[in-house]
Amino acid sequence: MSAPITDLFSLDGKVVVVTGASSGLGVAFAQGFAEAGADVALGARRVDRLADTAALVEAAGRRALTVETDVSSPESCQALVDATMQAFGRVDVLVNNAGVGTAVPATRETPEQFRQVVDVNLNGCYWMAQACGRVMEPGSSIINISSVLGLTTAGLPQAAYSATKAALIGLTRDLAQQWTGRKGIRVNALAPGFFASEMTDTYPDGYLDQAMARIPAGRKGDARELAATAVFLASPAAGYITGQTLPVDGGMTIT
């Protein structure tokens, strides 16, 4: 008799690296993967805030590692992966979650502001994928956190953010093409809609209420819904899925 299908969703014994793990969705990802059975390496610039995330991982009965990480630095990305290998001996899943956003009108956005977003949201994902791709074994998975703003617009001046999130979708396709057959590493992207985060906290008053008119589900997403989708994409249950971008947006992209 074959094993129960629920076993395909288990990540027991796996090691997951989560960037941007000091707040918001990064915390939800870390906790969700721990509850699915994985040990979790946590990277973020605000290393003092990683202790709270690590406590959630450990409360789920798994091991946690915290590493100060600036994903815009290739050396810092490599250091996170090296520390993970030293502590846990493997990297099975990367969640490329670290990101920043701006809401600056295009005629006023400075080169420095635009480059900062590109350095974190796009370049940082690439440096992390490179570092993990060098040590991952067949069966591993990379999940890039894009956005519905890589697929549509939302009435805010977010050229840099939208451009990088669209670029991540292209990066996801290409890395999947390069690595799935040759290395056995699946690469996919999530495109979240509106979830509570530090970025949504900066939106103008009333903006999110107005945006709900575009969302058939009629509400913001719950972070655990997004974390559960990431666990699915990383698990053997999604073993035949690669190079795809999955919107998790309450239907926003169909309107």
Image: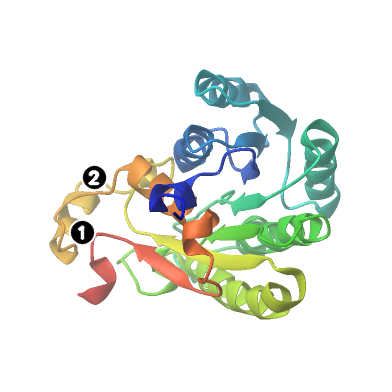
Which residue sits at x=63%, y=44%?
19
| Relative height, residue 180 to residue 125 (above, below) | below
Say what amino acid the circle numbered 2 marks.
Asp
Q: Secondary structure at mark 2?
A: loop
Q: Position of residue 111 (x, y in %)?
A: 65, 65
Q: Which residue is mark 1?
A: 211
128 relative to 108, above or below = above
- Residue at x 70% of width, y 78% of height: 181
The CA distance from mark 1 to mark 2 is: 12 Å
Total number of numbered discs in the rendering: 2
Q: Residues within 10 Å of mark 2 (few under 14, many from 20)?
A: few
187 or 194: nearer the eye?
Answer: 187
Mark toward the start of the polypeptide (1 vs 2) = 2
Determine whether the residue tagged by mark 1 lies in a helix, strand or loop.
Answer: helix
Q: Residue at x 67, y 73 (%)?
A: 180
Q: Are marks 1 and 2 in contact (CB under 8 Å)?
A: no
Image-based side of 104 in relation to 16, left or right: left
Q: Which residue is mark 2?
A: 205
Q: Quadrant of residue 22?
A: top right
Of labels 1 and 2, the one closer to you: 1
